[in-house]
Amino acid sequence: MTTTVAPPGQVALGQAVHWRGQSYLVAALQGTSVHLLSQHAEGEDAVILLDAMCSSPGFRIVDQAHPGPELIDGASAGVAGRDEQPGLGCAPLLDGLPPSVRDDAEFWLDHVLEVHTGLPGFAAPGTVPRPGFDPDRTTLRQRYATKAAELCAAHHQVSAGTVERKRLAWLRQGVWGLVDKRSLRTATARGRVDERVVRLLQKIHNRYKHKSIGTRSRLFELLKQACRRKFKKKADKLMPSRATFYRLLDRQGIACGKETARSRRDDGNRPEPPFTLPMATAPGEQVQIDTTSLDLKGIDETGRPVSLELTAAIDVASRSVLAAVVRPKSTGVKASPGSRRHGGRATKAVDALLLLAEMCTPQPMRPHWSLKAAAEGSDLPYAELVEADERMAGAAARPVIVPDMIVMDNGKVFAGRAFMDACAQLGISVRPAAYHSPTHKAIIERTFGSIKSLFSQFLPGYLGKDLSQQGKSVAKERLWRIDQINDFLQQWIALGWQQRPHAELRNPFLASMPPRTPNQMFAAHVASNGYMPVRLSPEDRLRLLPTTWVTVTEKGIRINNRTYDSRALNPYRGKSSGWPGKGQRWPVRHHPHQPEKVWLQTDATGEWKEAEFVYQRLIGDAWTEQVWDLASAQHLEKGGNTHNEAAIAREARALLQRAGRGPSRTSSHSEPAPAVDRGMTVGVEPAPDPYQGIPAPDFHTISALPSMDVSLSRLCRGPLPPVEPVAALPDDAT
């Protein structure tokens, strides 16, 4: 065995060293210390300074990576010595190969060395060849057959010719000769994916070519669904894995998502490193809330296609989406260039207030939802939650978490006084993020991206991230109503988000375990921190609505050009409210999305008086503030004024009736709009005339009936003939 004395800098991991008369293996190098593992049965491990070990007498490094020339039979091997042994320089080439191919080459290297020299590559110093592999007593042919029989006994179907071929390849090319060259073949345009699947992929891609560009995951899910419909039971075998599918897209030249157009990065908004991730150790400790565009179009209450906005809140500790709401976003219309814009709409402060109420309330299951979206049977601790809060019975698989602190955007939706007062009422502290720094609420920003890629892009009307990814036929697609999209979103949160593993939800003490779902993480926190429900009474919900201070007159309450009145307001007409500094103005709560009623607060204790819109009967259906604004704009275009509430109410009713027929797809108003699948008709339809098509009767042409004994003219001119009395029946008559 060849040995050399090495300086301290040449000691490396895995080397065998001789120190104090014993053999050790270098197990670890930590600072100036080295950890040695004894190679003797009764030896002891040691930890020593590297300089002290190298300077001790008798220390040397034993080179056992490969056998020396004295162990190689030059006559049988065809080589002269260790300096001519091939293959050592090819070892770095294995680093770029797949792990299975690299392991297979290392597997054959040990067996080829044993056939060639009599000892495997991992043999300890002083080991003698096994029987059947001693070069001094056996020939190469005998060693080939012995090695083949040994591998066959270990369930490796190998012949003696294969062992010989491996050894000769090792002599010619070194370790590279032991590599399976099938892994180095150049892939075709479709790789190893079935040709039928590739044709199906091209068909799906052509179908979505004029739609908005989505991510690769959307195309993968669409291909999986198409394979299941076409190939039935063979779909699982034919469908490639996700990684193979992504490589197939590159070979086919199909660009998706980020590959089409790189989004602009504003490095000026990035904070200075080092970056600190938001940390939370309990549910509700930190909740991030924000609003973003949903990259989607839908049908609003008036039947018009509009863009949508999403407002959501996510818990940092469990990554649970606590609440989410979809609202339309439109610019509105103007009656004249200098007039006020009517009908414009976006997410308002009341949406943020309602979001707080939804966080404290379990999401009820709806009849048409999948049973997999129910809390019962999910990873949530259903029995414990129902015991603490009976409202969880029959609820969706979404946890109820009351925030301790909310990190919000600086937009006017959240920075208004109504949102701050509602958070103070619920005992929630608010921390605004830094201006122009989305990284301060990075988790909610990343969640929005996930919702768009996992939810929005699978619905008709998807717009893409920007104009470069927007499809050409988005305006012609059959869109869903906003209430339907909101319903889809709530079901997807309970089924697709809360029960989907999240890469950030791992056990820090068991990093090898698979990632957990938000519901599983919430269940783990409930087991350690407990669960305390918060119940909001109807009065509490009213306090979360926006407040307007108005005077109660003889005609009632006027808010946003609408009059509300009821008999309950009689004691407060023209009276002082008693609120400091308000005079005769009373606090009135109103709901912009349900403007049929308002509520007057009589005193600080919370007694409420309800008033209804005086022309609600003319509208006759549910409506919103946006419908009223659009109706006002149309009324102003006809020369009316905002004080004619009855006329505006009729315009609102007409809008709702037109919404039931869907949006017009043509530019000409004279052409009828094509049918749109929007479910049941919205609004009140006029009752049909039962006498339509029947001519008016002519009484002069009516003839006498055959059963009459007098003519009709005589009957109508003269008095009626006297009626003869009927004889009375006896009492005992039957």
Image (tube, grey):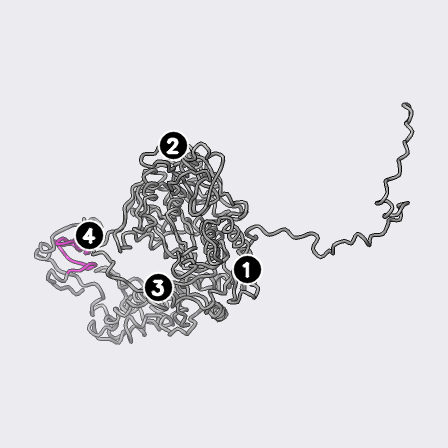
Q: Secondary structure at mark 3?
A: helix
Is residue 660 rendered to the left or right of residue 715? left
Tell me if residue 222 comes above or below residue 726 in the rendering. Answer: below
Q: Which residue is mark 4?
A: 38
Crowd band around label 2 with a 10 angstrom C-alpha radius: few (<14), some (14–19), many (20+): few
**Label whose residue precedes the other's in the sequence (3 or 4):** 4
Is residue 480 rendered to the left or right of residue 121? right
Q: Which residue is mark 3?
A: 100
**Between 268 and 346, the one nearer to me in the picture:** 346
Q: Residue flagged by tag 1: what amino acid is it?
A: Val
Q: Mark 2 and mark 4 in contact (Cβ < 8 Å)?
A: no
Q: How many marks?
A: 4
Tag of residue 676? 1
Frontmost of labels 1 and 4 is 1
Q: Secondary structure at mark 1?
A: loop
Q: Mark 3 and mark 2 in contact (Cβ < 8 Å)?
A: no
**Between 641 and 351, the one nearer to me in the picture:** 641
**Between 198 and 66, the one nearer to me in the picture:** 198
